[in-house]
Image (cartoon, grey):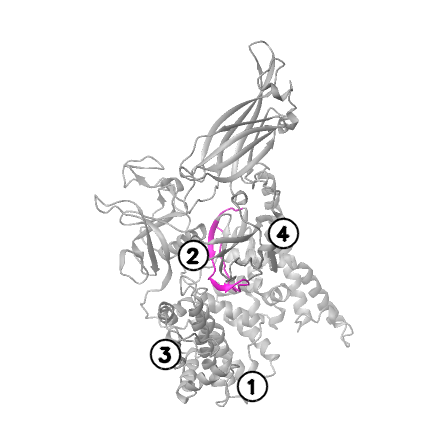
Amino acid sequence: EAKNLLPYLGPNKMRDCFCTINLDQEEVYRTQVVEKSLSPFFSEEFYFEIPRTFQYLSFYVYDKNVLQRDLRIGKVAIKKEDLCNHSGKETWFSLQPIDSNSEVQGKVHLELKLNELITENGTVCQQLVVHIKACHGLPLINGQSCDPYATVSLVGPSRNDQKKTKVKKKTSNPQFNEIFYFEVTRSSSYTRKSQFQVEEEDIEKLEIRIDLWNNGNLVQDIFLGEIKVPVNVLRNDTSHQAWYLLQPRDNGNKSSKTDDLGSLRLNICYTEDYVLPSEYYGPLKTLLLKSPDVQPISASAAYILGEICRDKNDAVLPLVRLLLHHDKLVPFATAVAELDLKDTQDANTIFRGNSLATRCLDEMMKIVGGHYLKVTLKPILDEICESSKSCEIDPIRLKEGDNVENNKENLRYYVDKLFSTIIKSSMSCPTVMCDVFYSLRQMAAQRFPNDPHVQYSAVSSFVFLRFFAVAVVSPHTFHLRPHHPDAPTIRTLTLISKTIQTLGSWGSLSKSKSSFKETFMCEFFKMFQEEGYILAVKKFLDEISSTETKESSGTSEPVQLKEGEMYKRAQGRTRIGKKNFKKRWFCLTSRELTYHKQPGKDALYTIPVKNILAVEKLEDSSFNKKNMFQVIHTEKPLYVQANNCVEANEWIDVLCRVSRCNQNRLSSYHPSAYLNGSWLCCQETSESALGCKPCTAGVPADIQIDIDEDRETERIYSLFTLSLLKLQKMEEACGTIAVYQGPQKEPDDYSNFVIEDSVTTFKTIQQIKSIIEKLDEPHEKYRKKRSSSAKYGSKENPIGGKAS
């Protein structure tokens, strides 16, 4: 959320705000627009892999403008090195002002030399040679590669000589390779520019300044960054060569105004893991996978991890993925849920807390239930989001001219349609979910034998409250909609979600009361207080929590995997057809890749998945465009440009997975395009020439659950390492309990831990510590190797990385 944003100067002080997430200057996500507010509450969550190196993770707050370009209010930019300081914490950041002088990214490769020259009259002078070699990672300008050039200046107390490189067209990685010469120590006969009244300069006071610019042609050139290198780096050496990070221009920061822009509240979780070869993870993996069989479950390695992590969510994601991959999640989830039930005194609060059990099941439903949500909810959510029917039934929120009875009918129509689809969907419910629901139901009935409803509420508290209701209210998070719904649609979805979750738990409530606080919702819900709804919910819950009902294996419906807007290069299928780039709506199912003029329109082009031979990145130089990839199939390659590096990475990943088992997959490919009669990469003239570069290694074939178990185990190792102090405390607590059986005089030391069997827990902790110690060794070796190989000033570790 943001607060205290700078108001408009006019009578209407409010703004329509949205926020973007950027890797350096590249936007990778944006939030929905919050209208008419100076303290917008976004409450949005984004999870993504970072596919490239970066300097800053930045957040920009914009004011939406319909007629002109959106106005940038301010930004928060966090250096990559500082991300770990903020990770896992909620922090208010002051918004900083934005100006072109501070918006920089990329690095410069530079070489300096000092030569001695003898002039015609025999005096000796020194010549500074500046070789500007290349730049890497310059920003996109208006979504396209820039036209960069550099100015090279020698600056001192009494001089400012400037020279300029040629402009390089449409590239973010220009190769300049230009050399400039400056005379730095004046001979006594030097008389030009005599106003300086110095015969010799002090080299210590000179510096080379390199400014990068984007050539604007008819508009103003844009500043891309600068570096300053003192000439005295050559004091002990005749030459100096290094990569430098571009820095913002010092423009006398207007710090007096920074507080006036407002602030932004962020919760960032950033992880960076080095994954070792598989054989290193055997012992830790084995210990974790034994967890479901450990008695009691609280003494297992997986449970202990949840106990010692500062945030249980950090532990849940890798744990659930690893256990799912080895079919161990159902027994583990069942055992931890049983532990939860022991502490539940009131049947009405069953599985309502945020425990390890509920979080594991939430995560499991997100991972395995994606397709189930798509086939069940997506068609209706599309209808709701694309129509503009008003469903507001709160008298206070009604707009002028709204008819509350019409709105009630609209809302009822949507609720009924969604409800009937859900209760008919049991055949699509994934097997893993059915197995867990069956276990929950049995355990709840045993725990509360006198409550006939509890076996249903145990299941509905997950499937309705934590699964369907959540997906309805935030369809974008579950990939059910490509964009964020607008404010009126979010309101409609909220009202539907509230009704659906109450309907779902209706079987466990008495008929005379509903759980709504608002009078208007109580009135609306009376429409659904019929026996038919209760029986329908009961029948649905019976079906999804029965061991007989499993996911229909005969289903031949294609699974929708990804969709979104990208640019494709015209195929040139006709001789006179243009070969330009056009914006298209792409849609990938488990059966085919299609593109359309707009969402919902007929496909303009279709590639059956079985015809895909390879999916690979395309070099930027092919079309002077970034974030490009190619789909190589039985016809001409399809060249596609994604909107950013994260999106490109996700498309390549999902296309590779869906086509991994295809016959005739290529082992080599061309990393550049075939243009003007030859391949740009290897200059082969035949369009059917074999590829000149090996294809990227395969990825896991499971489309539904993409799990790299080594990576998940590495993440768990990192979490144990970060929580070693807590693990130590837990170990001490086990010892205290085992030795001292009397009344606990000072329970604070270990009352926070769940320790049912101190001896077994102690043994497990010993095993964890031993395995972690053994894994520390190869990690330490890697750290030493990395710090010694990436010399300061190399491309991997450029100068200026730690201080700007």
Vertical comparison of 668 with 723: above or below = above
**Of the numbered discs in the image, which one, if any, rests on residue 776?**
4
- Three-letter amino acid code at the position of disc 4: Asp
The mark nearer the N terminus, 4 or 1, is 1
- On the image, which quarter does residue 727 sit in? bottom right
Q: Residue at x 41, y 88 (%)?
A: 530
Label 1 vs label 2: CA separation?
A: 43 Å
Q: CA distance from mark 4 to mark 1?
A: 47 Å
* Residue position marked by numbered label 2 in the rendering: 700
Q: Nearer the viewer, mark 1 or mark 2?
A: 1
N-term mark: 2 or 4? 2
Farthest residue, direction front: 11
First reached walking from the N terminus: tag 3 or tag 1: 3
Q: Is residue 434 left or right of residue 387?
A: right
Q: Nearer the viewer, mark 4 or mark 3?
A: 3
Find the magenta span and give its range: 26-54
Give the amino acid type for the residue marked by disc 1 in the picture.
Phe
Q: CA distance from mark 4 to mark 3?
A: 59 Å
User: Which residue in the structure is indicated by mark 1?
Assistant: 448
Q: Residues within 10 Å of mark 4 (few under 14, many from 20)?
A: some
Q: Amino acid at mark 3?
A: Tyr
